[in-house]
Amino acid sequence: MPQTAVIESLPPRDAPALRTPPRNLDAELALLGALLANNRHYERVSEFLRAEHFSEPALGRIYEACARLIERGQIADHVTLKNWFEQANAADQGQLDRQFLARLSVAVPLAGGAFDYAREIHDCYLRRELSILGEEVSERAHDFEGESRALGQIEEAEQRLFNLAERGTVEGGF
């Protein structure tokens, strides 16, 4: 291919690069499979992992349903989850059907890795939040018509970063 064709196919320098938010669907699916295979994994991950940490909302809803069942002292498996979602009228939300839940419970790559999967999910969540925060800080810095001064913006950004860092603790402490 001639050099000019390569150069012409490149995006302009000022064009923003399209990025996908940090996520690991394999880890999300593996964790749910591990939880369905052995509900005791929930004890270790529930201290820091929440449904909103999942990048895929449907998977977060499955995690939340597992959490509620396990915290009630019930078994969380594909049968009880199917009943849970039917009662909540959520079974028609695409991935929440019986076949999907059954595949989750048998497709566990490494059940002992549940904690590592949960940490990966949490790390990706923090990275998404950090990216959003960075974009918001950048937008505010370019807003010269607002009343906020630069030092005030820095202090606000520091506070938001500190809050994110506090939410980011997995094993207690920084």
Image: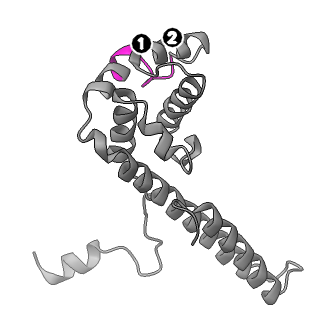
Q: Residue at x 89, y 80 (%)?
A: 147
User: In the image, residue 169 lies at what x, y percent?
Assistant: 56, 63
Q: Residue at x 57, y 67 (%)?
A: 130
Q: Is residue 19 magenta?
A: no
| Residue at far right of view | 147
Question: Is 88 situated left or right of 24 in this image?
Answer: right
Quarter of the image with the C terminus in it = bottom right
Question: Which residue is tagged 1?
Answer: 79
Q: CA distance from mark 2 to mark 1?
A: 6 Å
SS type, badge 2: helix
Q: Amino acid at mark 2?
A: Asn
Question: Is 154 situated left or right of 99 in this image?
Answer: right
Task: Name the magenta segment's main secondary structure.
Answer: loop
Question: Which residue is tagged 2?
Answer: 83
Stretch in magenta: 92-100
User: In the image, residue 148 lies at what x, y percent?
Assistant: 85, 80
Say if 63 sits above or below 44 in the image: above
Numbered tag placed on residue 52 in the rendering:
none
User: In the image, residue 8 lies at what x, y percent?
Assistant: 28, 76
Q: Is residue 99 magenta?
A: yes
Q: Amino acid at mark 1?
A: Val
